Image (tube, rainbow, N blue to C red):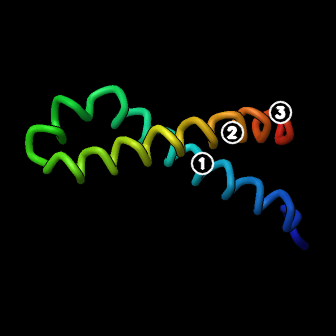
């Protein structure tokens, strides 16, 4: 007997991975300049913060929609 459908499992893992990416990018955007910027070269810091900003901006609305779908 199957407890969860394949769609429900996929939505669970999509939500979990999205949550982790959003949490990590949010912490980087909020506190990264205090902890990572002093030790990282300027080009590396720029790449990291740009990737965090883009991923946060694009995955945030998907996370909200996903939470409404799973509700």
> Which mark sits nearer the N-terminus, 1 or 3?
1
**The one of 7 and 26 positioned closer to us in this rendering:** 26
- Residue 12 image offset from top left, x and y in percent: 71, 54
Q: Which mark is residue 58?
A: none
Circle nearer the N terminus (2, 1): 1
Depth check, front residue: 53 or 10? 53
Judging by the rendered image, the residue that carries numbered circle 3 is 68
Quarter of the image containing the C terminus?
top right
User: How many discs mark residues in the rendered view?
Assistant: 3
Tell me the element at label 3: helix
Instruction: Identify the element where label 2 is drawn.
Output: helix
Question: In terms of secondary structure, where does tag 1 sit?
Answer: helix
Q: Position of residue 38 (x, y in %)?
A: 9, 38
Label 1 to label 3, Cα distance in Å? 14 Å
| Residue 2: % across, % down | 88, 70
Badge 3 crowding class, 10 Å Cα cut-off, few under 14, some 14 to 19, many 20 or more, is few
**Closer to the eye: label 3 or 2:** 2
Q: Which mark is residue 63?
A: 2
């Amino acid at each position: 007997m199957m407890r969860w459908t394949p769609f429900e499992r996929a939505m669970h893992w999509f939500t979990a991975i999205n949550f982790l990416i959003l949490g990590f990018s949010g912490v980087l955007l909020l506190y990264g300049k205090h902890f990572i910027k002093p030790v990282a070269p300027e080009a590396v810091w720029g790449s990291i913060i740009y990737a965090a900003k883009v991923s946060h901006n694009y995955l945030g609305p998907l996370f909200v929609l996903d939470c409404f779908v799973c509700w």
